[in-house]
Amino acid sequence: MIPVLLDDLPTLDDKLGWDREIQRLKVRVEKCPTPHVLGIHGDWGAGKTSFMRQLQHSLGGEAEAGVVRQQAIHAIPDENNSVVTIWFDAWRYQHESSPIVALLQEMRRQFSTMKKVKEKFEKLSTVALQYTLDGLAGIGKAIGYEAIPNSEKIRGLGEAWEKSNFHQVGQFDSLRKHLHDTIVALLPNGVDTRVVVFIDDLDRCNAKSAFKLLEGLKIYLSLPNCVFILGMNENILIDAVREEISAPANASGGDVYLRASHYLEKICTDIYRLPLPRTGSEFFSKMLMDGSADSNPAQAFVLAVGDTICLPPNLRRLKALANQWKRFSGCVLIPEDVEDQKVWAVRVLVASYIHQFHRDLWERWHFDADFWNECVAWCCGERSHNADGVAMIPVWAAALKLTSKTQVGDSGVRPAWAVQYPNPGDINLFWIDELIREYRDHLLSVDFRPLLEGHQAALEV
């Protein structure tokens, strides 16, 4: 039977117990003073898009077909007359000269398809709807004349817009006022409705595009009735801002980083940090069951791992690992004896983990099966010092960190590359080191040969 591989689509199916947090944020978004910018922080692969899609759904927003995995019970959201939602994939528009104009165009497109908006304008006319939507597009064009002009130029652009479109000049009017009036006109209940704009993958944009979009939000879209929710890895976004902001020539790297942090704080004063799953093992075992009629492999994994924290708490990485497991587990039959099944599960997990996350180690191992002995010795701290007692790190492990808190090497000293309090977001952690130490006597080099050779054969088939 061909295993069912997991995809990376966001989902409305809450498997992480986010429901209470979603409901709490839903109330905040519905009741907070506007304008408001809420940041959803999480590492890449932590589930930000799924979390934001679930929040959008709770607010009455409906995802376009084919972009979100959803169960039938989630297909139609509950009606919410106080909120309309817009979804904007910033990454798709990062090469636009003015990302804020792309955002306005996407708002126009999604407003034009909303049932609530159409019903409102049916009382007026289709022409009225088109005229209002064209107003939104026209403002985008006015902004696009200079990409992102500074605040001093806004009034001049506003007066130019009024002169060409309304044949009169208002002393204090600006593009921002016209934009606000247009948005309110489109909202089903006018000023009693708010638009919630979800901006996803901002941290995947190039630095210049991310900075331009943040500038555009600050200059043009800090408007009543508007809430913006930014999906972002805060550290990466700060790095992007750091590349673009001005700083004195003699400013240190730390000073520039603080300036970038303060800039982001000014735009986004409300940051929600996505909770990490305490352990990845529980969710990994569920993924092994996804689409499988045989529960024995998943049960063997649970028995083998127990309470050991041996997997990264990152949903995307766990999905990728589960896909590798499903391939490797087909290379060697699972034994009948329960104890043998536990060892089998650890062997499959180790091979899958190293193949997926540490290509250079896998290639060394695949070329020389006995390299496994070096890997075990490193995990056990037996390669922390050379014959003269000098601290060292194996060349092939220089970029990796062990998760060990107490393990010592043959010299009685904790390895220099082991970290006492690992950051679960670090991608250079060798998560399975504790499991390798626990099963060391059962993980012989010769026993991995069928996995090293059989995996390649399975891929060729």
Image (cartoon, rainbow, N blue to C red):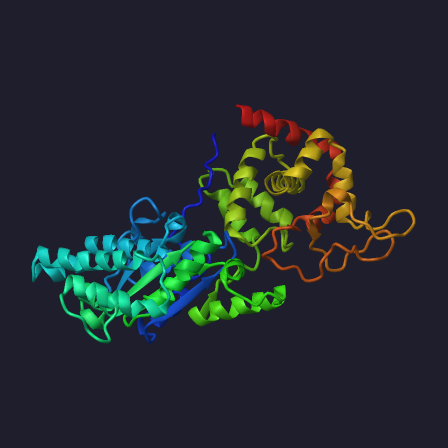
Residue 33 location, x and y as percent? 33, 76
Residue 402 location, x and y as percent? 71, 52
Q: Residue at x 31, y 64 (%)?
A: 196
**Residue 38 seen:** yes
- In this rendering, position of residue 167 left or right of residue 151: left
Q: Nearer the viewer, residue 323 or 112?
A: 112
**Residue 82 seen:** no
- Answer above or below: position of 344 versus 75: above
- In this rendering, position of residue 67 left or right of residue 356: left
Quadrant position of residue 395? top right
User: Residue furthest toward the right?
Assistant: 388
Quadrant position of residue 449? top right
Q: Residue at x 63, y 34 (%)?
A: 335
Residue 287 location, x and y as percent? 49, 45
Residue 3 location, x and y as percent? 48, 34
Q: Nearer the viewer, residue 144 or 107?
A: 144
- In this rendering, position of residue 187 left or right of residue 246: left
Q: How many marks can you see?
A: 0
User: Residue furthest toward the left?
Assistant: 124
- In this rendering, position of residue 342 left or right of residue 150: right
